[in-house]
Image (cartoon, rainbow, N blue to C red):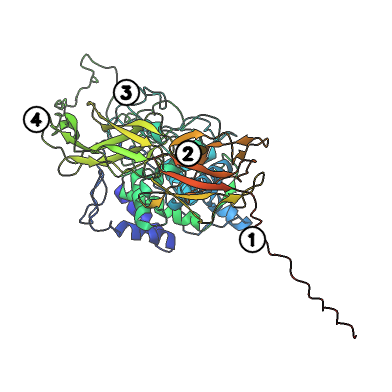
């Protein structure tokens, strides 16, 4: 297959920038210091070891299943086909089936809203869809985007592919012994279980629906805080989908091709690629569009020139010059395989995780650390540990995902990404499991507390005064902070109290008005805005004069008492009438 891929790559690289980019990708290496988290990833030295097809493929979306290796045509695509290009075959390559294309663009729009920093281009989904399933086998989907027949990859039984035992009881792939990649984006069941999304709003997460699969692929590629406009992050994301350098090169080639222009074609009229990464001998199955296992290779025909006839007792043909029987071939011995690091893991131990507590909306400052150990307590490096957020919570790992897979370091420790608290308060759990090994996991408890403030201050020092029966000219506005930082979205209560040492609600003096204009002296369910500001409604005064107190409290214990004065208008300072300015009458002459 390597030779076949090389010939195709040479052909494409002869005259186009598209394939030139693929050639550049072939020679590019990861940044210095990069580590390997699975077979086939570039190492710190820049070399790219061949993928280990027998390795556990759970670290990739597809389980490192086979893929289509066809490269884009030599001529660049046109945004819309013409009479000339229609006859050349380019439109069928550059064209994407209408429903499939719509799914990619809708996925891009959703990710632009939910994860804008990811910068996911729909052309990347199209490139992966082309390589994984030939755009849902040429767009053979119904009006809702579901494939006419399920798209299944080969059985991942370790024979030429990764070895992944059944994880879904055959629910998705129909196989209760081994897993198979499923759907137009070729997710393995264990990945779909947490990465699956409902992209068409029908309430289901169906890996064989292109809308569901496309949005799931988008979120998968946007995890870990990756920015796909950055070349290094783009490569990491693609390699996480299928851990192969050749796969990366092929996807990058189609990505560049689709970026130069494409157009919509009717569903079901797309071409299905022919070259496959597993097509080294012609006997390995590729993805099929049915739920049945592909047929076995046809036996070789009888050798010509050798007489045949009724079989004798030994199964040979009677002949005057019989061919000497061939020596029986001894059965191949089973190669001895040393256990993988994963095979040696006996249990997981906590590696010094501190108490996991964060305020709503904040990032947890503590991270979960888990160590993989043998039965003797020896640390096991290079083992994948999966962390999963469980329970009724909107907390996630950084990047918005609820599942993260981390490779243990040289001391056997895997450190989970930082947790991000949502708005929902309470306790939830994070479970740590060894990928590819059935051993008891660990559960960590995390707590999200309500947003809090420890200080309240008025934003103005203007005295708050009013005349009996009138209204206060200024509204009370306060700012909340916590440890010196703005405390946004903090719950607060405002009450007009009887005295500084008596927080009972007052029954006279200033008041607020409810929606019906009736007096109320306690306001609950208030909340500071994102800048920590809280502006109370307008205050009114009854006929009682005096000094009154308004107390504002927040979650976290911040309290502020504001003084309000109601007094009659001061008339003592009114100016006296001005003396008459008219001239005095002149005395009369005597």
Which mark sits nearer the N-terminus, 3 or 2? 3
Q: Circle 4 — which element?
A: loop
Q: Are marks 2 and 1 in contact (CB under 8 Å)?
A: no
The 10 Å Cα crowd at callout 3, few under 14, some 14 to 19, many 20 or more, is some
**Which quadrant of the structure image shows residue 364?**
top left
Residue designated by label 4: 376
Camera-side mark, 3 or 2: 2
Report the Cα–Cα distance between label 3 and label 2.
Answer: 74 Å
Q: Are marks 1 and 4 in contact (CB under 8 Å)?
A: no
Q: Are marks 4 and 2 in contact (CB under 8 Å)?
A: no
Write the residue at 29% across / 30% down.
157
Which mark sits nearer the N-terminus, 1 or 4? 4
The 10 Å Cα crowd at callout 1, few under 14, some 14 to 19, many 20 or more, is few
Q: Are marks 4 and 3 in contact (CB under 8 Å)?
A: no
Residue designated by label 1: 573
Residue designated by label 3: 177
Q: Position of residue 256 (x, y in %)?
A: 45, 57
Q: Position of residue 220 (x, y in %)?
A: 40, 42
Q: Is residue 482 above or below residue 461?
A: above
Q: Position of residue 339 (x, y in %)?
A: 15, 33
Q: Circle 1 — which element?
A: loop
Report the Cα–Cα distance between label 4 and label 3.
Answer: 32 Å
Report the Cα–Cα distance between label 3 and label 1.
Answer: 96 Å
Q: Position of residue 183 (x, y in %)?
A: 45, 34
Camera-side mark, 2 or 1: 1
């Amino acid at each position: 297959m390597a030779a076949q891929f090389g010939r195709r790559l040479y052909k494409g690289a002869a005259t186009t920038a598209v394939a030139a980019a693929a050639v550049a990708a072939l020679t590019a290496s990861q940044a210095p210091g990069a580590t390997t988290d699975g077979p086939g990833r570039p190492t710190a030295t820049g070399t790219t070891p061949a993928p280990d097809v027998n390795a556990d493929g759970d670290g990739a979306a597809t389980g490192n299943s086979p893929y289509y290796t066809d490269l884009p045509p030599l001529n660049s695509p046109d945004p819309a086909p013409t009479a000339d290009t229609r006859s050349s075959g380019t439109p069928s390559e550059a064209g994407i089936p209408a429903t499939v294309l719509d799914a990619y663009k809708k996925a891009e729009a959703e990710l632009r809203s939910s994860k804008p920093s990811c910068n996911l281009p729909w052309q990347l989904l199209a490139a992966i869809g082309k390589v994984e399933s030939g755009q849902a086998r040429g767009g053979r989907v119904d009006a809702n985007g579901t494939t006419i027949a399920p798209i299944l990859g080969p059985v991942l039984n370790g024979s030429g592919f990764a070895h992944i035992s059944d994880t879904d009881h055959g629910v998705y792939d129909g196989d209760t012994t081994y897993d198979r990649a499923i759907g137009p984006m070729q997710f393995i069941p264990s990945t779909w279980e947490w990465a699956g999304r409902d992209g068409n709003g029908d309430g289901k997460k169906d890996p064989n629906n292109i809308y569901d699969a496309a949005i799931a692929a988008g979120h998968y590629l946007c995890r870990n805080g990756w920015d796909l406009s950055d070349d290094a992050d783009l490569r990491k994301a693609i390699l996480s989908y299928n851990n192969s350098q050749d796969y990366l090169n092929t996807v990058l080639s189609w990505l560049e091709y689709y970026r130069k222009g494409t157009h919509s074609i009717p569903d079901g009229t797309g071409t299905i690629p022919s070259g496959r990464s597993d097509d080294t001998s012609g006997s390995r199955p590729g993805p099929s569009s049915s739920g049945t296992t592909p047929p076995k290779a046809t036996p070789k025909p009888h050798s010509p020139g050798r007489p045949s006839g009724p079989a004798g007792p030994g199964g040979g043909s009677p002949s005057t010059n019989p061919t000497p029987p061939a020596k029986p071939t001894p059965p191949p011995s089973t190669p001895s395989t040393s256990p993988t690091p994963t095979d040696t893991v006996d249990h997981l131990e906590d590696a010094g995780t501190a108490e996991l507590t964060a305020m709503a909306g904040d990032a947890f400052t503590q991270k979960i650390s888990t160590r993989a150990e043998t039965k003797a307590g020896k640390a096991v490096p290079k083992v994948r540990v999966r962390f999963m957020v469980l329970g009724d919570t909107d907390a996630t790992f950084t990047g918005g995902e609820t599942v993260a897979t981390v490779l243990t370091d040289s001391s056997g420790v895997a450190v989970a990404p930082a947790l991000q608290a949502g708005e929902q308060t309470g306790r939830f759990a994070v479970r740590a499991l060894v990928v590819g090994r059935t051993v008891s996991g660990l559960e960590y408890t995390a707590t999200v507390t309500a947003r809090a403030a420890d200080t309240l201050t008025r934003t103005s020092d203007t005295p708050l005064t009013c005349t009996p029966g009138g209204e206060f000219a200024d509204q009370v506005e306060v700012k909340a902070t916590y440890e010196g930082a703005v405390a946004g979205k903090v719950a607060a209560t405002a009450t007009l109290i009887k005295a500084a040492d008596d927080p009972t609600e007052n029954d006279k003096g200033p008041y607020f008005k409810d929606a019906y204009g009736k007096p109320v002296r306690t306001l609950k369910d208030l909340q500071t805005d994102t800048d920590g500001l809280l502006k109370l409604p307008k205050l009114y005064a009854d006929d009682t004069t005096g000094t009154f107190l308004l107390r504002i409290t927040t979650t976290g214990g911040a309290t502020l008492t504001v003084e309000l004065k109601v007094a009659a208008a001061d008339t003592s300072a009114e100016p006296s009438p001005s003396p008459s300015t008219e001239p005095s009458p002149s005395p009369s002459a005597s």
